[in-house]
Image (cartoon, helix red, strand yellow):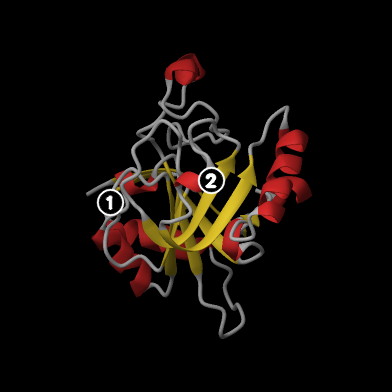
């Protein structure tokens, strides 16, 4: 299988349970809930995405003809001579990574030493071998993946109220304020919800707050 990748870059995880952890981000091109074109946003199943996942023209992006070739590109983004004991960590994201992330690629990433995380909308069953799974449900999409390590709900979403998901089998439950012109109000609302429902924790997009990728 070949892989279409928008970008590969090294940064800190900005949100969720692994916030602050150094990671290589492997952003796949394509999504099953939106084409990525602004002309299609109003009719998309997910109409609030703020990520560019169209094409293969980002830093480190391209088309990779094999799993080992892509794994080598990911490994090249991890700093050389890093301290022993810090396992390399790759976050597979998109778009929707599970359209392309498959067992051969997970095996190849493991072979070069990486723990493999996926950030998914939860509409596709995951491949075996993932080390960490983060699901971000969307109101108008059917949720197939109903268990994992963390559920990170962009909030508020009419039709995707937190109580719809709190009985699912996740280790961590996060509310993440929706970005955009109402971010400040959304953040205040998320804070109040977490205070009233302590199962939920607040996730902020710290990478945006401090200006890193």
Residue 2 point in image, percent of width and height = 26, 47
Residue at the image position 64 percent from the left and 60 percent from the top: 198
Residue 183 point in image, percent of width and height = 72, 35
- Residue 162: image tag: 2
Residue at the image position 61 percent from the left and 82 percent from the top: 83
Viewer-nearest residue: 103 or 142: 142
Gap in Å between the C-alphas at discs 1 and 2?
22 Å
> Would you name the residue on which mark 1 appears?
125
Q: Secondary structure at mark 1?
A: loop
How many marks overall?
A: 2
Residue 120 shows up from this direction: yes
Seen in the picture, residue 5 relative to 131 is either above or below; the reply is above
Q: Is residue 92 left or right of residue 65?
A: right
Residue at the image position 57 percent from the left and 42 percent from the top: 154
Residue furthest to the front: 196
Q: Is residue 92 left or right of residue 172?
A: left
């Amino acid at each position: 299988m070949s892989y279409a990748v928008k970008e590969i870059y090294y940064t800190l995880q900005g949100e969720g349970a692994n916030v602050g952890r150094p990671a290589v981000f492997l952003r796949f091109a394509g999504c099953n809930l939106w084409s990525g074109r602004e002309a299609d946003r109003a009719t998309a199943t997910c109409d609030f995405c703020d990520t560019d996942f169209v094409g293969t023209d980002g830093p480190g992006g391209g088309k990779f003809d094999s799993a080992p070739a892509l794994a080598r590109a990911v490994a090249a983004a991890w700093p050389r001579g890093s301290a022993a004991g810090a396992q390399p960590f790759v976050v597979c994201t998109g778009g929707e990574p599970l359209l392309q992330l498959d067992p051969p690629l997970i095996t190849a990433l493991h072979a070069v030493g990486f723990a493999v995380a996926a950030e998914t909308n939860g509409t596709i069953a995951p491949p075996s071998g993932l080390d960490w799974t983060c699901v971000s449900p969307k109101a108008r999409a059917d949720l197939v993946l109903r268990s994992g390590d963390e559920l990170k709900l962009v909030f508020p979403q009419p039709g995707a109220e937190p109580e719809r998901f709190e009985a699912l089998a996740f280790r961590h439950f996060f509310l993440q304020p929706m970005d955009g012109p109402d971010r400040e109000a959304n953040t205040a609302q998320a804070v109040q919800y977490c205070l009233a429902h302590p199962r939920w924790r607040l996730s902020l997009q710290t990478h945006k707050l401090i200006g890193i990728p």
